[in-house]
Image (cartoon, rainbow, N blue to C red):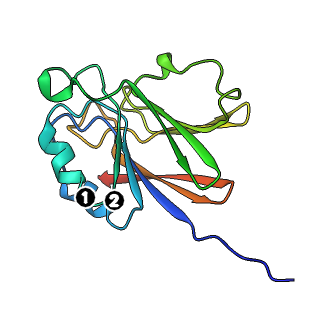
Amino acid sequence: MTTRRTQSSRIGLISDTHNLVRPEALAWLAGCDAIVHAGDICNQAVLDALAPIAPLTVVRGNNDTGSWASSIPTHATLDVQQVRIFVVHDIADVPRNLHDEGVRVVVTGHSHKPLIVERDGVLFVNPGSAGPRRFRLPISAGILTIDGAHVEATLHTLTP
């Protein structure tokens, strides 16, 4: 009997860039199979900087206003291997029926606070803010590593 192993997918997680694309963020996301931006982009130039790295899944944050942002959805769903990922800017806007939709991971932003926590079988990840420093919160981003139905999240501080 031969066991066929799937190749892991690396999904870069970034949020709350607020017009700032740090070289450290671009370096962290290099080599990802896809990138998720969980909102508060604030300018098309941010997306233009990320797009050459990997395909983007993007949601609109509360600071994403104007004509450039009008076509960006408020939430998105992404299927990677056997894992369904739901993306929304504010955790307050996460629907209650996650299990009905088969969601295994929720990616949010908004609070600028990096977080990985599992609740009722769903992994919640906030990569924090990769943009301007807010209070004493770290400048950070994340990665989801997906292998079949297995998913693991990691966070990375971009600047001290």
Residue at image mark 2: 29
> Where does the image place residue 102, in percent across and percent down from the top left?
67, 35
> Where does the image place residue 50, in percent across and percent down from the top left?
24, 52
State the residue at coordinates (14%, 38%). Answer: 44
Q: Secondary structure at mark 2?
A: helix
Q: Residues within 10 Å of mark 1 (few under 14, many from 20)?
A: some
Report the residue that reaches farthest toward the bottom.
1
State the residue at coordinates (20%, 37%). Answer: 132
53 or 160: which is nearer to us? 53
Whether label 1 touches label 2, CB < 8 Å = yes
| Looking at the image, residue 50 lies above or below residue 91 | below
Q: Quadrant of residue 46?
A: top left
Residue at image mark 1: 26
Q: Quadrant of residue 43?
A: top left
| Looking at the image, residue 18 lies above or below residue 45 | above
| Looking at the image, residue 61 lies above or below residue 104 | above
Q: Which mark is residue 44?
A: none
State the residue at coordinates (64%, 27%). Answer: 98
Disc 1 to disc 2, C-alpha distance:
5 Å
State the residue at coordinates (57%, 19%). Answer: 95
Q: Secondary structure at mark 1?
A: helix
